[in-house]
Image (spheres, rainbow, N blue to C red):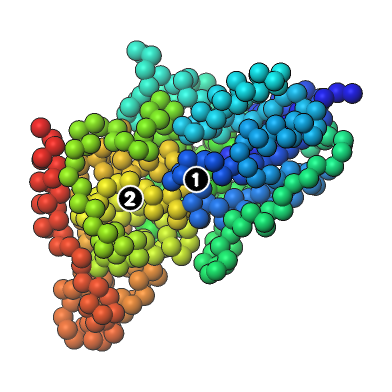
Amino acid sequence: MTAPLIYWYRQDLRISDLPALSAAVASGRPLVACYILDDQAPGEFSAGSASRWWLHHSLLALREQIHSLGGQLVLRRGATWQVLAELIADTGADSVYCTRQYEPWGSALEATLHQELAATGITLKRYGGNLLFEPGTVMTQGGGPFKVFTPFWRNCLAQPQPPQPRPPVDELNWHTGKSLSGDELNDWELCPASPDWASHWGQYWQPGTVGARQKLRDFLAAKVDDYSEGRNHPARDSTSRLSAHLHFGELSPREVWHAARAAAGDPARAAQIDKFLSELGWREFSSHLMHHFPTLAELPFKSQFEDFPWLGSPAALAAWQRGQTGYPIVDAGMRELWHTGYMHNRIRMVVASFLTKHLLIHWRAGARWFWDTLVDADLANNSSGWQWVAGSGADASPYFRIFNPITQGEKFDEEGRYIRQWVPELAKLPDRYLNRPWEAPAELLENAGVVMGQTYPMPIVDHRAAREAALAAYGSIKG
């Protein structure tokens, strides 16, 4: 009797264009599909609350897909090595197939499993599939990793195009031996309960491949035509919102790439597509950085920032987290994040700059908050993004580039729709004072129902003074 193999799902929660699964199917051997909730992941980097909500619904969608093909997704909780050993003993499997991960613990886990499984005669086979270009394939002429995005992406574009997506797997040879026990998904308690702060998230998100493809179709049908400019304006619906789907592997980047290329059409649209794909390139760049520099989530990429004089005020951090800073565009972003599990990318830069430069709070505190509250929390993207804004990262924004939260709101939310949606207590103020309500005349404030310091907070820092303090702090380490 042919020994089965185990397909170990990780951040690849799909059945289409999945090289590892295609290889498993091509072997002709019976297949056992499993997902392991490993509580042994490093403490602060175990899945955040918003990610756990998404994971629950993504696993529901994957389980239904596999069930429709006559199979079973076995769910088990525990240390990965122990769970795999139990599955091997239960099934007689002699090999494990999986998709590579690039977080430091993911790579370390793969290396450990490879050794431990090999010692018992079991083969671990790892495949790419969640990036367009595997780390190590895009290198400088000197053989080192790129540290600047533009030459990195130029080199990527000079490579042969990513292969076309593999056709969907529609016939699988499932293991039909003894019935395999598994956990009930609800028993994992991935979703919040008391209170259920995500009860309304279904109106914003549809985790799973079906929802991912619908998002992609909607974006390419019309939204991409306004992408280059519209992506900077949070009130416009001009972005793809595919980040969580890509993080959980519900959609392959190759499928996104080729669907976008196929939708290019005329030169004007092709330019919009190129800009969109370059943002996909930042996702690649971040993952390559994390692969080559595994301390990216913990230590500043630029070593001089190890001596930066961060302040770390708990009260200021709490005000930022709650969207109570007194700067409307910052508060709108933080409230959007809390309410939807998402924040517009332009606003991510604004709120990150405010935390690290106006409040002089360490970027790691912001990264931790994003990790817990974003449905698309991704260690490489999150860490590189925060370090980029803080000035300590690879190809980072210069530290002295300090976003003015007043002018950012006036420029990118020019009609005030974004602020009025998320900071409704200011909705009746005229545009002139919407980003600087503390300057509004008393009569206007009264007519708008705004009492500064009561219905809306006064700014927790003065912009000009905060900017000077930030530049002085930077000056202390620059030399």
Identified by mark 2, the residue type is Ala
Please give left or right for residue 446 compared with residue 160 in the image: left
Q: Which residue is mark 1?
A: 46
Q: Which residue is mark 2?
A: 365
Give 476 or 387, whichever is nearer the viewer. 476
Q: CA distance from mark 1 to mark 2?
A: 16 Å
Which residue is at a point 74% across and 35% down the rendered structure image?
87
Task: Count residues near mark 2 (Cα–Cα under 10 Å), then give few for <14, some for 14-19, many for 20+.
Answer: some
In which quarter of the view is residue 142 placed? top left
Mark 1 or mark 2: name the one nearer the start of the chain.
1
Question: Position of 21 compared to 352: left or right?
Answer: right
Residue 260 spot, x, y in % from top left:
54, 39
- Amino acid carrying label 1: it is Ser
**Residue beneath the point at 30% across and 68% down:** 324
Give the quadrant of the C terminus.
top left
Spot occupied by residue 357 in the image (x, y as percentages of width and height): 21, 50
**Left-right relation of 115 to 306:** right
Furthest residue toward top:
142
Residue in the foreground of this view, choosing between 373 and 46? 46
The residue at the point 45 percent across, 53 percent down is 372
Tell me, yes or no, if residue 152 can be seen here.
Answer: no
- Residue at the spot x=69%, y=27% of the render? 96
